[in-house]
Each structure stands twice: as C-alpha cells, then as structure tokens.
Image: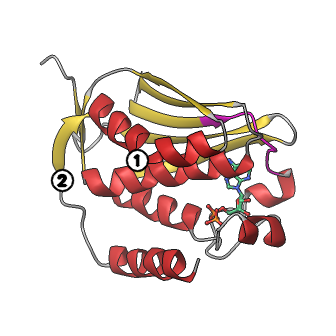
Amino acid sequence: RLETMSHSLLRLFSLENEAPKMQRFSALSLAKSVEESIAYPLRQRQLVLELRVEDEWVTGERSLLEILLYNLLDNARKASNPGSKITLLGTKVPVGYCFAVKDRGRGIPPEALSRITEPFYMVDKSRTRKAGGAGLGLALCDEIARLHGARLIISSTPGVGTTVSVVFDTEGAQYEKANQ
Ligand code: ADP
C-alpha cells in the first residue's frame, strides 16, 4: 500500500508543474488498453467490464489518461459486489467527448461527494485501507483531468451505484473527429 501511495503522491506533485505531452490517439484504443490492464483484478472479484465506447480521435497525454481511467475503474471495482457489472462509456457530447465509469456498487453518501477528490479523503477509512486505498486516487484523477482542461463529474446514489464522468471540452481543439 505504501508503494502505491508514494507512487500516487509523486505523480500528484510532479504533475503540478508539468504540461501534458499531447498525443493523438483513438478513444477506443485507450479504453482497450485500460481494459487489458484491469482485467485480472476484475476477474479476481468476478466483475464484468462492459465497454461502450464510441471511437473518436482524442488528444491528451495517453499514459495520464490511462492512469485516470484505471483509477476510476479500480474505485468501481472496490465498491462493487462480486458478480456485478461495471461499464466504461465513451460518448461524443456537444462540447466534445465524455468518458464515464459506471458501477452498481455501494455508492457515496451525499455529504461526502463534495470532498471526495481531496487528497487523503476516504469515506470509510477501514474499508478503503483494507482494499488498498490511501485516498489519493481521485485527487490524482482530478489533477489529470484539470491538466487536460476537463473536469470530473461524480453522481452517486448510496446502495445503487456511482458514475464518474470526465468531460473533455473541444475548446482549444483538444478533440477532433476521427473520420476527418
Ligand atoms: P482510494 O485511493 O483510497 O481509492 P480515492 O481518492 O480514489 O481513494 O477515493 C476516495 C474515497 O471515495 C474512498 O473512500 C472511496 O471509498 C470513495 N469512492 C471513490 N470511488 C467510489 C465509487 N465508485 N463507489 C463508492 N465509493 C467510492
């Protein structure tokens, strides 16, 4: 856990002074890479990952966006009961492109929602510690999104599930149509 935590912390600090190294790649290929890297942890909990990703050229630092999606999927994994389904969505939206991770897990209490991206904030400390968390995952995701001119939108209902969306704005020409 310490190793994961110090790695996340280092990433968080180093990101603050860095501009992302922009690359152009397909949203679907990004989703598939992340699917591959999270496959084993998901299988261990008998969780099914459904990919519903519209392909589109996206521009960003690919490795950072992989970390972002991986962290969101890992949170979904930790919140889900064995056997349930997690969906990774990628959708063209009027302002640009939206990735979202939807789980049918335990949900987040409304009073915690506004604090959840703060470093070291955990809803249930004993449970998240046991699951290997340190409260840094969403802080890192938030920072990565911010560096890409995007933001996290978290909607959750306790006992029903959580959806975390990242909306990338096309302003600044970060996204282009794949077929142009
Ligand atoms: P960690 O690295 O410990 O997972 P995060 O910063 O990723 O910490 O998340 C902060 C808190 O938000 C944790 O306490 C976790 O329980 C809660 N959380 C994050 N994502 C979800 C989710 N999809 N469902 C329920 N709780 C979540």
Observer-side mark, 1 or 2, equals 1
State the residue in front, 77 or 173. Answer: 77
Task: Give SS at disc 2.
Answer: loop
Residue 164 drawn at (x, y percent) = 60, 43
Instruction: Give neighbour class at mark 1: few <14, some 14-19, many 20+ (Cα, 10 Å).
Output: few
Q: Residue at x 82, y 71 (%)?
A: 126
Label disc, if present, on residue 22 of the rendered structure: 2
Q: What secondary structure characterizes most of the magenta part?
A: loop
Residue neighbourhood size for the residue with mark 2, other residues' Cα within 10 Å, grouped as few (<14), some (14–19), many (≥20) = few
- Can residue 149 be seen here? no
Q: Are marks 1 and 2 in contact (CB under 8 Å)?
A: no
| Identity of the residue drawn at 62% across and 63% down | 117
- The percent position of residue 145, horizontal first and vertical second, equals 42, 55
Ligand 1 is within 8 Å of the C-beta of the residue at disc 2: no
Kindly indicate the quadrant of the structure image that contains residue 128. Answer: bottom right
The residue lying furthest to the front in this view is 44
Q: Residue at x 80, y 72 (%)?
A: 125
On the image, the x and y values in percent for residue 52 come to 47, 21
Give the mark nearer the N terminus: 1 vs 2.
2
Q: Position of residue 175 (x, y in %)?
A: 25, 35
Q: Is residue 164 magenta?
A: no
Residue 80 visible: yes
Magenta highlight range = 102-108
User: What amino acid does circle 1 point to?
Assistant: Ser
Q: Which residue is mark 1?
A: 37
Q: Nearer the viewer, residue 153 or 121?
A: 121
Does residue 27 appear left or right of residue 77 in this picture?
left
